[in-house]
Amino acid sequence: MPSQPRPKPAEFHVFDTTLRDGSQQEGLNLSVPDKLTIAALLDELGVGFIEGGWPGANPNDTSFFAAMADGALRLQNAQLVAFGFTRRVGMKAADDPMTAAVRDSRAPIACIVAKSHDRHVEHALRTTLAENLAMISDTVRHLRAEGQRVFVDCEHFFDGYRENPAYALEAVRAAAEAGAEVVVLCDTNGGMLPPWIGEIVTAANEVGVPLGIHTHNDSGCAVANALAAVDAGVMHVQGTVNGYGERTGNAELLSVIANLELKYGWPLLPAGSLREATRLAHAIAEVTNVPPSARQPYVGLSSFAHKAGLHASAIKVDPNLYQHIDPALVGNDMRMLVSEMAGRANIQIKGEELGFDLSDRELAARITDRVKDAEAAGYTYEAADASFELLLRRELGQLSEYFQVHSWRVFTQSTHGQETDTECTVRLTAKGQSQRVVGEGNGPVNALDHALRNALRPAYPAVERLELIDYKVRILDQGHGTDATVRVLIQTTDGLSAWTTVGVGQNIIEASWEALCDAYLYGLIHADDEVAAPQISQQRVPLGA
Amino acid sequence: MPSQPRPKPAEFHVFDTTLRDGSQQEGLNLSVPDKLTIAALLDELGVGFIEGGWPGANPNDTSFFAAMADGALRLQNAQLVAFGFTRRVGMKAADDPMTAAVRDSRAPIACIVAKSHDRHVEHALRTTLAENLAMISDTVRHLRAEGQRVFVDCEHFFDGYRENPAYALEAVRAAAEAGAEVVVLCDTNGGMLPPWIGEIVTAANEVGVPLGIHTHNDSGCAVANALAAVDAGVMHVQGTVNGYGERTGNAELLSVIANLELKYGWPLLPAGSLREATRLAHAIAEVTNVPPSARQPYVGLSSFAHKAGLHASAIKVDPNLYQHIDPALVGNDMRMLVSEMAGRANIQIKGEELGFDLSDRELAARITDRVKDAEAAGYTYEAADASFELLLRRELGQLSEYFQVHSWRVFTQSTHGQETDTECTVRLTAKGQSQRVVGEGNGPVNALDHALRNALRPAYPAVERLELIDYKVRILDQGHGTDATVRVLIQTTDGLSAWTTVGVGQNIIEASWEALCDAYLYGLIHADDEVAAPQISQQRVPLGA
């Protein structure tokens, strides 16, 4: 049997740097309200420390700290940390305006980044090794004297240790002797591997100061590197929610926390908080506007999704045979995907999730055949949960016809020097009333969407609430050029939840039309769910998930 | 100083399972042509083994192995592997149709998955522990006798070892004694952490058979887990390109390879191949149509991108101060995010590759600005090499007008109970002759393709040789539904080589038309290349790449 993880240290810091190092990610730009919202979510998660930014270095961060100091948000669990640099070369800490900005941020804790790699001191900072140590010492002493608790990030510590171990340890010692509470060893370039982290942290333990770890994912090992440091004795771990950060990102903090809570058995967050991890990770992604990764460990949309028919039959026996933890522990769900690899067991489980009784073997087998035929023709129900439900309802005779389409036409024209023009007509009957409506739009599908909505509105005012929020096209049968089968996925929302429908055809417009009609049909079927049938509306994917 | 990695074993397997386990990913569905294209790219990367799928279990995989056996693709570096299961309970291996499918796939190697976790044998397989061992032994012996090399994947090995170590090792022994060349220890549920992997692999070494490792990313440690197994002595590592796979995905194979090649100093791929990793990872993502992660270690678009500021001046002094490896080693580039897109140097190099002299700084800067503007509007030239060449020719005044389009119109009509009908007209001038041509097709783009070809044929009979072989659509600006910007990529061949063009617009037909016209224009420019200028035709992508 493998050895047990070491017991949890008496004091252990979960330190979030989403708002500081996470915001170094390409394309991620946070306003002050964004930062306040994320800070509230992080506090709800229950991290111990929120590094809010670098006051003095950019106006947004300065304003965020001012807003926090003015009580814009009262933290329940976390303490606020201001990031800063060691004082400038040849200057007194008290005179450095950047050090002043950290001090004046009114954050109870300062986290000061210091050079610990000799080559960086000489080539980037362009000063002597001794002056760098004095800069560390002076800055820590000054901020301590001014009443802040101080953590020190030793930048490039691991690379530095490999080239000049004595100097790297000197930097740690200078910070500790000046009063730093924790010295954080940083794999700034992210190139380390877990055994190297373990050995170097073990060596750094000789300084006798509480140590922390800050890792990046450049070798694909950020989480494992953080754990290797924990195994070697650090009592403070830094990371970002959703792994945001420069280049490949920082250690994904929720994965680190979940590993420590669920695999090491260490309680780190307030009781019950880990069960909010999936919701909070997605809520933070809504604020950053970075699409969440479906494959993100623990909290991804796909992280407990099973496709193989092989697994499905076993999962019916015991779900834990095919999952490493109970997904409810992190607020996630197991999902069975309906696909050509799936057998009857998948279809039955999926049907039950949607509230249909498919226990009849013959019925389940017939539906499985229908799904296989449809998938062979290019349909996919993995993503298109709404189309799967419509298929089930058709097979079960539980689908009322909300409208009958008689015909549609769409016309696009382009003349050199003029804007491309698209127009369409749709003819349908809804609640016995015949409608013939014209639509226009940026493209043919957009025009058809407008026309269909206008044709349905008199009979079903509820279509007003429906909005198409995503449209995806996939060409099947590569190698056939423009004469190929096309699959269209459309995601639609009613403001409360969202659902996806699929259409397939050789004509992209025809495929889009099919997905479009099913999108509205599903929306109409569930238009009264919120009042009448909450047990079905629960099955729909919540917005943002 | 940390200890050195162990020396490379005399034999070491890089085993890719993108086409088998990778295709278990939610939303990832591969056609036979997709599989052939990806197999060609993996072979170009130089992996030793390509697990192509599960013949007999689904029709696409069966067809893929038939196509490979019929010579659809000749592998230069890799060997093809067919995945299968141990024989059914109570059946002779020779009589099991699933075993027969693996044998009859004509793949030189079979990789057979076997249960090694006692609870899975009893609850999922519903047989005795002894029968499971007999199933392993019989299946391996049968396939060996029929002439296949055999690897065995021990499913849930690590979870199984933690509950019943003796039985897990029995399964390994049964496989080895029956003639399995490698026994692969699988963390099927992905819940392991690196130290546990290391300890359990070390224990399994006692069986004395060459071992492999197969990991998943459920704890965020798939790459580190694979490396921990390598450190403990395995000689075979499995993974998928871009980390595709069920739930959180498999170990990302390029990260594993890059770590072993660049950090352990082990040569694994053919010389120079690792420098193609970024291109190949993105090419595979084009085929799967799964948007690549910008943060993916080594090969991500952002993986060597630095936000301006703190790092910028130091990078000017020495780029290696802020990157863990030279990005050129994996075919990636350092990017400073002051300017969002590719820099002048890239454009110059790319231009030279295509045979254009861009050494003039001002000219190169002007073209760089054009590229940046186009990329901001949604164009991409990473895949669309032909459109990039047309852009260069336009800027250099080296583009003759082969034809002038005056107008086009396209009309699609659907009436209930009848087939959808599409018709278009195109009006253009070619070699002074005005043409007005009507076209029909399965869809609007197919109809326009026919009309354009017919309109060009009188002036340029060479269009007869051109064929559109791929058509891809990506919706940009997710979240805008059908009212979004659309990017179309069209791949065209003249039977000797293939090239890709790009079109962008809010109207999918307009975007397709742009890519279509450029596809024909590029084809006409190069119509005589094979005789006149082979040095240019070399630059075009060979078919199947």
Image (cartoon, coloured by chain):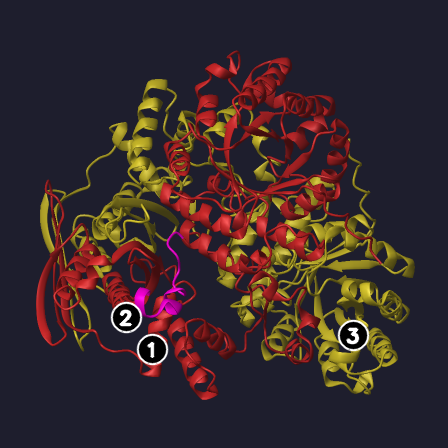
Chain colours: A yellow, B red
**Residue under label 1:** B393
**Nearer-the-camera pick, B352 or A312:** B352
Start-end of magenta stretch: B530-544
Q: Which chain's residue wears label 3? A: A
Residues marked 3 and 1 touching at CB (< 8 Å):
no
Left or right of B78, for residue B431 = left
Task: Compare residues B409 and B135 and report the one nearer the observer.
Answer: B135
Kind of residue at disc 1: Arg
Outermost residue, front side: B531
Q: Secondary structure at mark 3?
A: helix
Tell me if mark 2 has few (under 14), some (14-19) or many (20+) residues whose alpha carbon lies within 10 angstroms of its own.
some
Mark toward the viewer: 3 or 1:
1
* Residue corresponding to mark 2: B525
Q: Determine whether label 1 and label 2 are within 8 Å by CB.
A: yes
The residue located at (82%, 64%) in the rendering is A161
From the image, state whether disc 2 or disc 3 is nearer to you.
2
* Foreground label between 1 and 2: 2
Pick the quarter of the image with the N terminus of chain B.
bottom right
**Residue type pointed to by label 3:** Arg
Residue A399 visible, this orientation: yes
Where residue B318 sits: x, y (%)? 69, 76
